[in-house]
Image: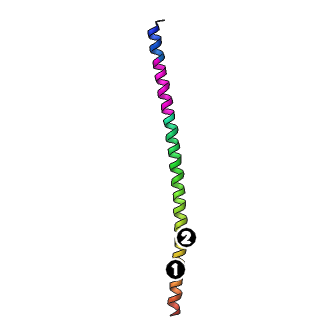
Amino acid sequence: MDFGKYLNMNTNANHVFVTMTKFFRMKKQLNTIFFVSIVGCSINILCNIMIYKKLSKILDCMNNKNNKNNTDK
C-alpha cells in the first residue's frame, strides 16, 4: 500500500471525524440553548400569568373599594 495514499485517507477520515465531533458539540450546545430558552419562556409566561392574576385581584379590590365608597355617598 502506498504510504501517501494511506496518509491521505487517514487525514480525510480524521477530518470527517473532527467535523462530526464539532457538529455534535454544536448540536449539543444548540439543544442546551433551545432547552434553556423554552424553560425560560415557560417560566416567563407563568410569572406573567401570576402577576396578571395578582394585578387583577388588586384591581378588583380597588374597584370594590371605589364602588363601596360610591354607594356610601
* Residue at 53%, 43% in the rendered image: 32
Crowd around label 2: few <14 · some 14–19 · many ≥20 (10 Å): few
Q: Residue furthest bottom?
A: 73
In this rendering, is residue 62 above or below 20? below
* Circle count: 2
In this rendering, is residue 53 above or below 4? below
* Residue at 52%, 91% in the rendered image: 71
- Real-space Cα distance between discs 1 and 2? 12 Å
Residue 1, position as x, y percentages in the image: 49, 6
> Which mark is drawn over residue 21?
none
In this rendering, is residue 2 above or below 64? above
Residue 20 covered by magenta stretch:
yes
User: Which of marks 2 and 1 precedes in the sequence?
Assistant: 2
Q: Residue furthest top?
A: 1
Q: Which residue is mark 2?
A: 54
Tag 2: amino acid = Lys
Residue 3, position as x, y percentages in the image: 47, 8
Q: Which residue is mark 1?
A: 62
Crowd around label 1: few <14 · some 14–19 · many ≥20 (10 Å): few
Q: Secondary structure at mark 2?
A: helix
Q: Which residues are magenta?
A: 11-24
* Residue at 52%, 67% in the rendered image: 52
Residue 65, position as x, y percentages in the image: 53, 84
In this rendering, is residue 33 above or below 22? below
Q: Secondary structure at mark 1?
A: helix
* Residue at 46%, 15% in the rendered image: 9
Tag 1: amino acid = Met
Residue 13 covered by magenta stretch:
yes
